[in-house]
Amino acid sequence: MATLVLTAVGTAVGGPVGGAIGSIVGQYIDQNVLFAPKARHGPRLGDLSVQTSAYGSPIPKIFGRMRVAGTVVWATDLIETRSTSGGGKGRPKTVAYSYSASFAVALSARPIRSVGRIWAEGKLLRGAGGDFKAATGFRLHLGDEDQPADPLIASAEGAGETPAYRGLAYAVFENLQLEDFGNRIPSLTFEIEADPGPVALGAIAAELGEGEVATAETPMLAGYAAGGDSIRSAIEALGDVVPLSLSDRDGKLRLAVAADPPAELSSEEECARRQIVRQPAGSVADEVSIAYYDPDRDFQAGLQRATGGGAPAPRSADRRALPAVLSAEAAKALAEFRLAALRAARTGARLRLGWRRAALRPGDAVRLAGESGLWRIRRWTLEPMRVALELVRLSNAPVPDVLAEAGRPVREPDLRHGPTVLRLFELLLAELSGDSARLFAAAAGPEAGWRRAALSASFDGGTTWDEAGATSLPAVIGSATTMLPPAGSTLIDVASAVEVELLNESMWLGNASDDALVNGANLALLGSELIQFGAAEWLGGTRFRLSRLLRGRRGTEWAAGQHEADEDFTLIERDALAMVDAPANAVGAAVSVSAIGVDDSEAATANLIVTGESLRPPSPVHLRAERLGGGDIAIGWARRSRRGWDWPSGAETPLTEEAEAYRLVIAGAGFERVVATTEAGYLYTAAEQAQDEAAGAMTLSVVQLGTYGASRAASATLD
C-alpha cells in the first residue's frame, strides 16, 4: 500500500526520479512496518521421523528420495476379532482376541512416484521387494490431480463425504494386524521416491515459488523435504551452509550460487568514512554440527561436525538441521564450509552509498575497493539520498573434499516371508497327555524371512473350517534324501545314517552329547518314527548327514522298519509346535489343516487320519519268558507310560491310565490262549499247557489296555 501511495506522490513532485525514490521508500515501509513478516519456521529434522495425527500438522513437499513419517489423516477404531479353541473333555475353552485397524497416512503435499520400504516402530513392515512382513491390505495414492477417493474411506464415511486428497500423496492400510505392535497403530516411516534421481535446489525453489523465484545453477540434492510457512523458510536453512545467494529482486526471490558476478563498489562512491568491524574470536562458534538424512543409514538422521583447532574443547557450537538427504562426506564438507564462513563473518563493514546503488539487495555479493575477497550485504537501509549497507566478509575457501564415516547402521534383515510349508502329525508328548488326540502343526518356508501363518482346521472333509490359532516359531523342517534302514531301539545305532535337506539356509542342525540325548535333545520326526541324533555333519548348502541315532523314541519303535526315501523330516521343538484341538471323537476321522501367511497366494494344506497314537499307552517292553522247574512258564514284561519316559532304577513308571490292564495272547501250532490280567506278568502253568496241547515254538504278544485305547503289541518267540 505505501509503495503505491509514495510512488504516485514522488512522481507528482519530482518526476521519474521522485517516483523511483518514492517506490524504494514505500517498499521499505511495506516490508518493515505495515506488512512486516512474522518469524518464519522452516522444517525440522525430527518433523520427518515422528508420525503425527494432530489437526493442522504441516505436510512437507517431498523432492527426490526421502524417508518420512507422514501424518495420519483418517483411521477406524480398533477392530476386535475373537476366536475360541479347546473346550474338550476336562479342559476349558480358550478365547483369543486379535486386533486390526485401517488408516490413511498423508506422505507428501506434492505427487510422488512410488513408496519403497516401510518401517513400523523401526522394524521393516514392507521390504524392498514390496513384500509385507505383517498381514495388511495396502493402497498407494500418488497425489495426482485426478485421483479418486479411496474406496475403503468412502465406504466408511460415505461417497459424498470423502475427499479425494488430490495433489496429496497418501497411503491406506486396510486391516493391518496389530499383534506385533502392542495392539495399537504403530509409528510408520516410509521410503518415498518423488522424483527420478537427484533434484537441483533451484528446481525445488522454482516449484515452491510457482513462478515467483528466479534461479541459476544450484547444487543437486538426493532428497529434500520442503516445509515451513514460506518459500524462503523452506530453503534458507540450506543457504546458511551452502554457498548460495538469496535475495529479493524485481518482485521475485532470486536464488543463485555465490560465484555470480559481484557488484564492484569503488571508494569514490562512498558518502562517509567506511567502518571495518572485527568481532573477538570468542564471539564466534568454534564447532559446527550438521544433522541430515543419511542414505547409507536407511535415511536415518546422521550428524557430522567440524571443529576449530586450539582449545581442547569447543567453547560454543553452531548446530544446523537440514531436512535433506546427504552423504556423510557432503555433510562433513558443509560443516567445514560453515565453520570457515563463521570465521570469515567475524569481519564486517559499514558504509553508505549514493541512492544510485539503491538497487542492491540483502544477500547480494559485492567487492570493496581496498579489501580482499567477497562481502555479502546483510542489511540494507534507505537514508536521505543515500543507502546504508552492513556487510560481512565471505569465506574464500571452497566447499572442501573430505572423508567421513556415516557410522554402522543397525539394520533389520530384509528377508522375504515367502510361501508356507505345513506339516501335521499326531504326537505323544508326555507332558500333554490327555483325553483327546494331540495334533500338532509345524510350519516354515523356503524363504528365511518366513514368520507365521494363520491356521484353520476341518474335521468334516472340508465342509466347514474353524479358526485354529496361528503357527508357532518357524520349525526346522525338510525331507530325507536317503532311506534310513531298520534298527532296534535299545542301543545307540552307530551303523545307520540318514541325509536330510532342510527348507532354507537359515535352518541348522547341531551335535548333541550322550547326556544331552538322554535329556531329550535333537528329537526329530522322520516319517512316522521319532529319532534322536548325536551327530549332524554339514554337507554344504542345506544338507546334513545324521548319525549316532537313538531309534523308535517315545513308543515309535514300530515305525523303525517303515522308512522310504523323500519322507518328511521335522525337528521337534516345543516352541515351534502349534497344537490343533481335535474333538473327542476324532480318532479314525480325517482332519485337514490349512495355513496362510502374509505372502501366500493360496493356503498350504496338510491332511491326516487320526489314529489315536497320542491316546494309547506305549507298548510294553522287556517281554520275557522263563521255564520253571515244574514245567510252568513265567511270563513278564515292563509297562511304559504316556506321561513319562524316564525309568528311574528301582521305581515303576507312572500308570497314567484309569486302571492297569493287559491282554496277553499265547499262540502256537493249533491253539491260541487269550489272557486278561491286571499285573505285568502271567504264570502259564503246565496244566494250561497240557490243555492247549502246547508243544514246540510259541509266540507271545501283549498289549496294555489304556483308558482311550490299546497299545501296540510287544511280541516275542518262546522255543
Image (tube, grey):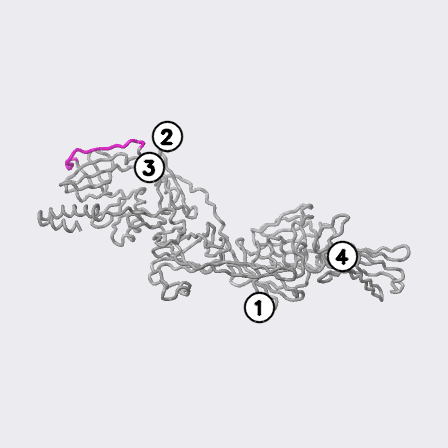
Mark on residue 370?
none
The residue sitting at the bottom extreme is 463
Disc 3 marks a residue whose amino acid type is Leu
| Residue 620 badge | 4
Q: Nearer the viewer, mark 2 or mark 1?
A: 1
The 10 Å Cα crowd at callout 1, few under 14, some 14 to 19, many 20 or more, is few
On the image, the x and y values in percent for residue 463 come to: 58, 69
Query: Marks 3/1: CA distance?
Result: 73 Å
Residue of label 3: 339
Quadrant into which the C terminus falls? bottom right
Amino acid under label 1?
A: Thr
Q: Which tag, 3 or 4, sits closer to the chain's start?
A: 3
Q: Which residues are magenta?
A: 267-282
x and y, in percent, of residue 31 in the image: 21, 47
Contact, mark 1 vs mark 4 (Cβ under 8 Å): no
- Tag 2: residue type? Ala
Q: Secondary structure at mark 1?
A: loop
